[in-house]
Amino acid sequence: MKRFFLIILIYLLIPVKAFSFDITKNNIVLFVFKDKHTICIYNTPDKDSIVAKIYDDGKAGLLNGFDVIEKQDSMIKVIAWNTINNKKIKGWVKITETDIIGHEKNHIYELYERPDHNSKKTIVNSDWEKYTTRGGAYMKITANIDSNFQVFDISGKWLKVKVIGKDKVYLKWLPREYQCHDICGECN
């Protein structure tokens, strides 16, 4: 009974914000663009020397993530980490060698012309119905966007990404609320 009252007292004394998750305070987390594609991590943005070479191997459970520290031209300074061990590597990688997992809301993505919610917005459906032939039968299926978006630029918490939709390819800005920062894609 004492424990119950202690928990209630702590809950009342600590602001509710301590229990909430504010994505705007977290860094951007990116991933290796292609499975089995080697990425070089350099000691400077000028690519003076290679610090390490890394790659993903999904079958072996080896996935790499990058905590973005800063951006300089087409390079980003990162802390690289992986799912196998706690080894962390600090260095520079090319932005275009990374991707982000999209986090759709109500089956759509909102993409913008500029990294600003007041710029022109494009709504892209994350899935659609189409007809195809399977086993000699003509049937309706649901097609989905590949939610791994290649990153081309970063501005604050916004990412310029390539999204391949139903009949069109988009190169637009993806706001923070449509980005998944879990290396396994477990976003809610």
Image (cartoon, rainbow, N blue to C red):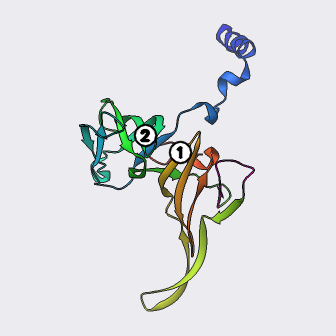
Picture quarter containing residue 121?
bottom right
Residue position for label 1: 154
Q: Is residue 118 inside the magenta stretch?
A: yes
Depth order, front residue of 14/173: 173
What amino acid type is highlighted by mark number 2?
Ile
Magenta span: 108-119
What residue is drawn where x is 34% and y is 38%? 83
Left or right position of 32 against 40: right
Left or right position of 178 against 65: right
Q: How many marks?
A: 2
Depth order, front residue of 28/131: 28
In the depicted structure, whether residue 120 falls above or below residue 45: below
Q: Is residue 187 visible?
A: no
What amino acid type is highlighted by mark number 1?
Ile
Please identify the quadrant where the C terminus is shown: top right
Mark number displayed over residue 76: 2
**Image x and y of residue 55, in percent:** 29, 47
In the depicted structure, whether residue 141 falls above or below residue 148: below
What residue is drawn where x is 72% and y is 58%? 120
Q: Say whether disc 1 or disc 2 marks the residue closer to the N-terminus.
A: 2
**Image x and y of residue 154, in percent:** 53, 45
Q: Secondary structure at mark 2?
A: strand
Q: Is residue 55 inside the magenta stretch?
A: no
Q: CA distance from mark 1 to mark 2?
A: 9 Å
CB of mark 1 within 8 Å of CB of mark 2?
A: yes
**Image x and y of residue 85, in percent:** 29, 33
In the depicted structure, whether residue 157 falls above or below residue 110: above
Left or right position of 157 against 16: left
